Image: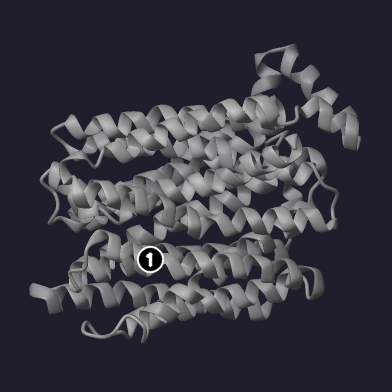
Amino acid sequence: IRETVAIITLICAMLTTQAALGIVVVPLEIIGRTFDVENKPGQLSWFAAAYSLTTGTFILPSGRLGDVLGHKKLVVAGYAWTALWAMAAGLASYASTPVVFDICRGFQGVGYSLLLPNAVALLARTTHDGHWKRALYFTCFAATAPNGFILGACFSSLIAQFHPDRWEFAFYLAAICLAGLAVIAAGVLPSDAYLRRVHGHDEDDHDEGERDWKSGLVKWSRLLDVPGTVLAVSGLILFNFAWNQAAVVGWQVAYNPVLLVVGLLLIGTFLYWESRHATHPLIPKTIWTTRNSIVLLCVALGWSSFGIWNFYSVRWWIQLRGVTLLTAVAFTTPAGVAGIIAASLSVFLLSRVGPGPVMLAALCAFCAANALLATMPIQQTYWAQSFPSYAVAPLGMDMSFPSACLLLASALPQRHQGVAASVVNTVVNYSVALGLGIAGTVESHTSGEGLVGKWEGYRAALFLGTGLAGLGVVLALAN
């Protein structure tokens, strides 16, 4: 029973991560009304992008931190941290500016960056490479993504639709649930010492790491690759911030292109540091094979297109068709059912044909989901194109994630499972935020006045998502 509860607690990491996104995406304009920005798309997109930005950025060092300090500790800390900042995000409703809410959402994302890679690492460490349970755990982990989004959207919409001035209570409810998960995780998750004793992996290497940890600040800094962490986090934040802020102020404001260039320079410096000087690279060099690099690029393209689809599929029905929040959530429910089916299908396909063809199928699903919405007229029945889109998109989510995790987990030793998980989760969550930023810029330059003008902006953003996923299909075929 304890093992079952532990696995469920780890799988809830993905469930709550996506719930934290759904909690704002559907009632976006109602939340914006509190801060008088309901008619400013650039400001509204930050409510989702700030969260995805920090989640995707800080995941990268979090995997290494878990490898050093212990994955269980980081999972417990992640749940506790997200509970704290979910409460703070609710209290931010009393602020006079959306910046406070954006900051709270950003700090909430930091908690999930601690939680996600270390939950995946624990799932990987409880099974052996090639064991059917590992594929099952990863696919179940991925299957909770669409259902987590629906769950978060359902509770927030239920409160916002009937009590629009009390939308923050959804965040208070989330904080209570996350605090409960932190307590459960502390009680049932296996310790790193227990996992080393049972599975017997890399005990000597881990003991060496422990000695380095205790020997002094300099060796500790090298073990965690602090210079690489600072360069990577700074570069990724500035690069992504510039794209998302462009939807608010445009590229004509001087600081925005400057931040973009500085971000690129920092990322370049990080890559140089990792390849030439880092004694304990933040990303192990063994990851950077040609095949793994193409896999990660495919994941980036697919999930950036998914972020665009996820955001605009809901906005389409609320803003263009004028449906209620709960109706919009009801329209997303096929995604939850399809997610479960896709997860079950993934277990079968991964064991039969391998992760390569499964990744190709996932990118085709991402591409089809965006294309269906991009070509949909304003006045059309839900069942013609919207329903198929919601049914297809989860195939991309629940096939690409376990495929990438299995490929990287198999390429790295047990002691680096946290790093493998952090790389995949970094690409997934960072790509969502970056896709939203680019799509917001495209929308702001293509939308016009009135309903038709807004429709043109949405279509342009969705065609962007279609193109990104289509490029991923080409790369997957080449791989």
> Camera-side residue: 19 or 200?
19
User: Left or right: 286 with respect to 185?
Assistant: right
Q: Looking at the picture, which amino acid does disc 1 mark? A: Ile
* Residue drawn at (59%, 36%) of the image: 62
Residue pushed farthest left? 449
- Quadrant of residue 100 in the image? top left
Q: Nearer the viewer, residue 228 or 61?
A: 61
Whole-percent x, y for residue 39 in the image: 12, 56
Instruction: From the top left corner, tell me how far across and down residue 409 is, in percent.
Output: 75, 52
Q: Residues within 10 Å of mark 1 (few under 14, many from 20)?
A: many
Q: Position of residue 421 (x, y in %)?
A: 66, 47
Q: Quadrant of the N terminus?
A: top right
Which residue does the numbered mark 1 point to in the structure image? 308
x%, y% of residue 32? 18, 48
Q: Which structural element holds mark 1?
A: helix
109 vs 66, left or right, is left
Q: Eyeballing the image, is 351 above or below 83?
A: below
Q: Quadrant of residue 363?
A: bottom right
Figure disc tally:
1
Query: Which residue is rendered at x = 35% and y = 65% of the image?
Result: 330
User: Residue 7, located in which quarter of the rendered image?
Assistant: top right
Foreground residue among 30 and 429: 30
Which residue is pictured at 59% across the width and 73% down the height? 362
